[in-house]
Amino acid sequence: MKCSLCDASLGPVIVGSVHWRLVLNHNQNLLGKCFLATRRHFEEVSSLTEDEWLELHQQLAAAS
Ligand SMILES: [Zn+2]
């Protein structure tokens, strides 16, 4: 199953990693506004794998 958030064409991608993409938000009401999107579809945060959680933590730490 796919949705607009896990679609491979989602972009523009600022930073890509194994499990996540940092995507520039088209709405730039706040300059530089972006969001993290996974590379695979999931519907529950609890379904993230251990590797995905670890990399999410790394991405958030890198962004702050
Ligand atoms: Zn999806």
Image (tube, rainbow, N blue to C red):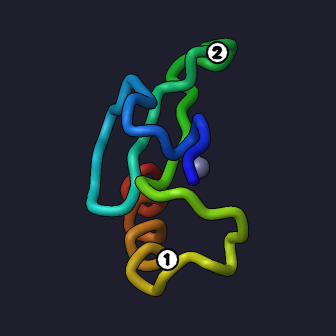
Residue 48 on image: x %, y %: 56, 76
Horizontally, is 31 left or right of 10 in the view? right
Identify residue for label 2. Answer: 27
Most foreground residue, 1 or 57: 1
Local SS, label 1 = helix
Residue occupying the point 48% across, 55% down? 38
Q: Residue furthest front?
A: 1
Q: Quick one: label 2 or label 1, which is nearer the N terminus?
A: 2
How packed is label 1: few (under 14 Cα within 10 Å), some, or many (20 or more)? some
Q: Work out whether 16 lies above or below 44.
A: above
Horizontally, is 59 left or right of 27 in the view? left
Q: Residue furthest bottom?
A: 50
Horizontally, is 14 left or right of 41 in the view? left
Most foreground residue, 23 or 7: 7
Q: Work out whether 18 lies above or below 29.
A: below
On the rendered image, what quadrant is the N terminus found in?
bottom right
Name which quarter of the figure residue 12 lies in.
top left
Kind of residue indicated by mark 2 = Asn
Residue 53 on image: x %, y %: 49, 77
Kind of residue indicated by mark 1 = Trp
